[in-house]
Image: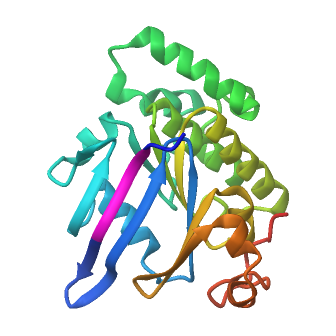
């Protein structure tokens, strides 16, 4: 597929006098995985929040052929633009099943389709089916991330934006999460992926942007950036942004 599903141009986000994002231009095509890598504080999360309309911003956000700058958050969600934040924001006292059902709240009237989507999620995440009656707050970090992804899929995303999905997870779970992200491509879901685990992100994505202190400083096919010596020295040497807590997935 070559049609563009999301196109951001001249996007700027400021907190007071501090510019978190400056004049950003990002594009994602239908069925494509696009990653934005860079150190902590680069403005990556602010960029995603601006796309969702969660923070004030200027510039153009074109989604599925339409400008959405004036749309409220709920309307963006209803149109299939979904964000899974770094904090995951699960209802910890509720069961896995009930968390998933809440993901389809915007489509609550379509019970037949929601049941079909729930079956798809349980097929994609067998562990969630095993723990369907378990309270979300009692699950491991990896399981909670799977639940956050599953709940997002219940919203029927056309574009799924993931903010640090591997954060704090063991290497074996990171690989599993990235395998699932890769499978989303074949399901026709476009993914905009924010990651400090640069190697895992570049190994999975089709296209990549590099962000530093609010500016997009590089972009290109993920394979090209993965083999770029200068970028490798900065981001793929086992540390990203001065931290080394992330495993480097192969």
Q: Is residue 230 above or below residue 193?
A: below
Quarter where residue 141 is shown = bottom right
Q: Is residue 171 above or below residue 198?
A: above
Q: Is residue 71 above or below residue 233?
A: above
Is 8 within the magenta?
yes
Q: Is residue 168 visible?
A: no
Which residue corresponds to the image point at 79% horizontal and 85% vertical from the top-left?
A: 237
* Position of residue 152 in the picture relative to residue 245 (left or right): left
89 or 137: nearer the viewer: 89
Which residue corresponds to the image point at 70% horizontal and 46% vertical from the top-left?
A: 182
Quarter where residue 132 is shown = top right
Q: Look at the magenta stretch and give its main secondary structure.
A: strand
Which residue corresponds to the image point at 37% horizontal and 69% vertical from the top-left?
A: 25
Which x, y percent locates residue 71? 18, 47
Per the rendered image, the range of residues in magenta is 4-10
The quarter in which the C terminus is drawn is bottom right
Which residue corresponds to the image point at 25% horizontal and 47% vertical from the top-left?
A: 73
Q: Is residue 119 visible?
A: yes
Which x, y percent locates residue 109? 32, 14
* Position of residue 24 in the picture relative to residue 248 (left or right): left
């Amino acid at each position: 597929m070559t049609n563009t599903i999301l196109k951001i141009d001249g996007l700027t986000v400021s907190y007071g006098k501090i510019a978190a994002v400056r004049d950003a231009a990002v594009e994602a095509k239908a069925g494509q995985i696009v990653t934005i890598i860079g150190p902590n504080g680069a403005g990556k999360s602010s960029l995603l929040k601006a796309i969702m309309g969660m923070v004030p911003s200027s510039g153009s956000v074109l989604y599925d052929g339409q400008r959405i700058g004036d749309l409220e958050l709920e309307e963006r969600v209803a149109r299939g633009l979904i964000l899974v934040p770094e904090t995951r924001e699960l209802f910890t006292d509720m069961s896995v099943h009930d968390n998933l059902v809440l993901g389809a709240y915007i489509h609550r009237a379509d019970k037949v389709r929601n049941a079909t989507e729930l079956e798809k999620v349980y097929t994609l995440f067998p562990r969630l089916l095993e723990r369907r009656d378990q309270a979300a707050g009692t699950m491991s970090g990896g399981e909670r991330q799977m639940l956050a992804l599953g709940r997002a899929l219940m919203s029927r995303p056309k574009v799924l934006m993931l903010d640090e999905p591997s954060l704090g997870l063991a290497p074996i779970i990171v690989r599993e999460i990235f395998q699932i992200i890769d499978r989303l491509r074949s399901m026709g879901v476009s993914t905009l992926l924010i990651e400090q685990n640069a190697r895992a992100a570049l190994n999975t994505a089709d296209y990549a942007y590099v962000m530093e202190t609010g500016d997009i400083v590089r972009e290109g096919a993920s394979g090209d950036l993965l083999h770029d010596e200068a970028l490798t020295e900065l981001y793929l040497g086992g540390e990203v942004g001065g931290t080394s807590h992330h495993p480097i997935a192969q």
